[in-house]
């Protein structure tokens, strides 16, 4: 991955920097997130595509061997059983490029994160 100062300024530019087959996967992930979080705004943060809804909602990025998906630790914890077959860490998961990307699972994780973000926002207003 490139340094943040050299990173593309838009998600479209970010995706365009990868080979066609990876671009296709990135567009599918992006579309899945948009579908699950239609009110979220797109941004580039930390040099990677980010969706924002009352704070960072999820990030995603392409690497040599995988698509990284970053739904925060709560998103990983909530779906830990379904994510257990993938490499990951406290707030991230790696979907190998040579396997189908689990778009339905991504959609469910994003929907969960949207509910969390809205609940957090409502709590702040109280």
Image: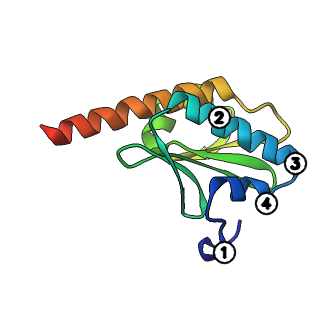
Q: Quadrant of residue 14?
A: bottom right
Residue occupied by mark 1: 6
Residue shown at 62% from the left, 58% from the top:
10
Residue shown at 79% from the left, 30% from the top:
100
Residue shown at 71% from the left, 46% from the top:
67
Q: How crowded is mark 4: few (under 14 residues within 10 Å), some or many (20 or more)?
A: few
At mark 1, the secondary structure is helix
Q: How far apart are the alpha carbons under marks 1 and 3?
A: 21 Å
Q: How far apart are the alpha carbons under marks 3 and 2?
A: 16 Å
Of residues 42 and 96, which is closer to you in this image? 42
- Say which label, 1 or 2, has the lower sequence index: 1
- Say which label, 1 or 3, has the lower sequence index: 1
Return the residue found at the far bottom.
5
- The quadrant of the rendering that contains the C terminus is top left
At mark 4, the secondary structure is loop
Return the residue found at the far left.
126
Q: Residues within 10 Å of mark 2 (few under 14, many from 20)?
A: some
Q: Position of residue 3 (x, y in %)?
A: 65, 73
Q: How far apart are the alpha carbons under marks 1 and 4?
A: 12 Å
Residue occupied by mark 2: 31
At mark 3, the secondary structure is helix
Residue occupied by mark 4: 17
Of residues 38 and 86, which is closer to you in this image? 38
Q: Which label sits on residue 18?
A: none
Q: Position of residue 27 (x, y in %)?
A: 72, 41
- Say which label, 3 or 2, has the lower sequence index: 3
Residue occupied by mark 3: 20
Q: How far apart are the alpha carbons under marks 4 and 3?
A: 9 Å
Q: How far apart are the alpha carbons under marks 1 and 2?
A: 25 Å
- Say which label, 2 or 4, has the lower sequence index: 4
- The quadrant of the rendering that contains the N terminus is bottom right
Q: Do the numbered discs 3 and 2 sit on residues whose CB atoms are within 8 Å?
A: no
């Amino acid at each position: 991955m490139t340094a943040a100062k050299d990173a593309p300024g838009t998600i479209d530019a970010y995706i365009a920097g990868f080979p066609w087959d990876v671009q296709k996967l990135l567009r599918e992930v992006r579309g899945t997130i948009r579908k699950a979080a239609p009110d979220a705004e797109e941004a580039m943060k930390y040099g990677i595509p980010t969706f924002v809804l009352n704070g960072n909602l999820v990030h995603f990025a392409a690497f040599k061997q995988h698509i990284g998906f970053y739904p925060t630790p709560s998103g990983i914890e909530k779906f830990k059983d379904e994510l257990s077959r993938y490499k990951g860490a406290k707030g991230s998961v790696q979907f190998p490029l040579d396997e189908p990307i689990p778009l339905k699972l991504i959609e469910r994780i994003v929907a969960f994160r949207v509910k969390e973000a809205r609940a957090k926002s409502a709590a702040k207003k109280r």
